[in-house]
Structure formats: C-alpha cells, structure tokens
C-alpha cells in the first residue's frame, strides 16, 4: 500500500462525507501515519489513543485472524461507538488503512444496531 493510495482514499472521503470525516491513517508492521485529523478533534492525548488503536487493529491484518472466519478474505471491519464509526481495511503484510467518521454517516446501521441491542 502506498501513501498515495491512502491520500486518494482521504480525498474520496472528504468529497463524500464532508464534515463527518474524523480521521484517516495507514500503518504497516513498524509504524503508522495519520494523514488527516479533523481540527476540532486534535488534542494532546490523541497520539496515545492512536497508538492503542493501531496496535489493536494490526492483529486483524495477520493471516490467522483472517482465517478465524470461514467467509473468505477479510475486506474490512466496521466498529460502531457512541461517538464514532471506525472502518478498518486490513491489507497483506500487517498493513492497513483506518478511517473514522461521525456516527451520522451510518445512521441507518446505528439505528438498526440500537434496535438489536434493545432486544438483548
């Protein structure tokens, strides 16, 4: 994965989600790079938070994690939180891209998930 490809993704996301885009980054087995963080979300603790997220997400890029489900290659995961949606696109060789969005982008999915949670 090249930085240029992730920059293309970030541009696409800016065009399609506008102000709902929170952040875009990519990583490999050694390091990560944040290409975009919405200005209102920048704070001192952000680096520590990103370190933790990337450490966790790297596991999904490992082959054994992808073999845990019998549905073929893992294309990506979507995590829904109260304040954000996290999309992770794991790639070969412990690489990947991470996108965070405001929850309004996935309003239908969030509403559906809340309906399911209410029944639990």
Image (spheres, rainbow, N blue to C red):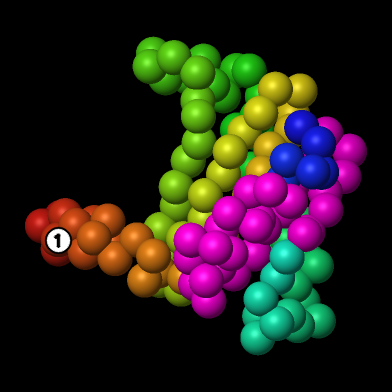
The answer to whether residue 73 of the structure is visible from this angle is yes
Residue 15 location in percent, x, y?
Answer: 54, 63
The answer to whether residue 53 of the structure is visible from this angle is no
Instruction: Residue at the far bottom: name it.
Output: 40
**Residue at horizontal 52%, vertical 49%?**
87
**Residue at horizontal 64%, vertical 64%?**
23
Count up the numbered dots. 1
Residue 60 location in percent, x, y?
Answer: 60, 33
Which segment did they paint magenta? 7-35
Instruction: Residue at the far left: name it.
Output: 119
On-image quarter of the N terminus: top right
Asked whether 36 falls inside the magenta stretch, the response is: no
Instruction: Give the vertical position of 19 relative to 56 (above or below).
Output: below
- The residue under label 1 is 115
Dot 1 alpha-carbon crowd within 10 angstroms: few under 14, some 14 to 19, many 20 or more: few
Q: Nearer the viewer, residue 27 or 49?
A: 27
Residue 50 location in percent, x, y?
Answer: 73, 61
| Residue 85 left/right relative to 63 | left
Instruction: Give the vertical position of 88 relative to 91 (above or below).
Output: below
On-image quarter of the C terminus: bottom left
Asked whether 12 falls inside the magenta stretch, the response is: yes
Instruction: Residue at the far front: name it.
Output: 15
User: Element at badge 1?
Assistant: helix
**Residue at horizontal 57%, vertical 24%?**
65
Residue 79 location in percent, x, y?
Answer: 45, 52
**Residue at horizontal 83%, vertical 53%?**
33
């Amino acid at each position: 994965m090249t930085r240029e490809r992730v920059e293309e993704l970030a541009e696409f996301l800016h065009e399609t989600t506008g102000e709902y885009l929170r952040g875009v980054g990519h990583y490999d087995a050694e390091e990560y790079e944040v290409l975009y963080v919405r200005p209102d979300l920048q704070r001192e603790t952000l680096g520590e938070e990103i370190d933790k997220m990337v450490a966790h997400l790297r596991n999904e890029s490992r082959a054994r994690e992808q073999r845990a489900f019998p549905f073929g290659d893992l294309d990506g995961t979507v995590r829904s939180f109260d304040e954000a949606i996290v999309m992770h696109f794991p790639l070969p060789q412990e690489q990947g891209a991470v996108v965070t969005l405001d929850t309004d982008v996935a309003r239908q999915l969030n509403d559906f998930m809340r309906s399911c949670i209410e029944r639990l």
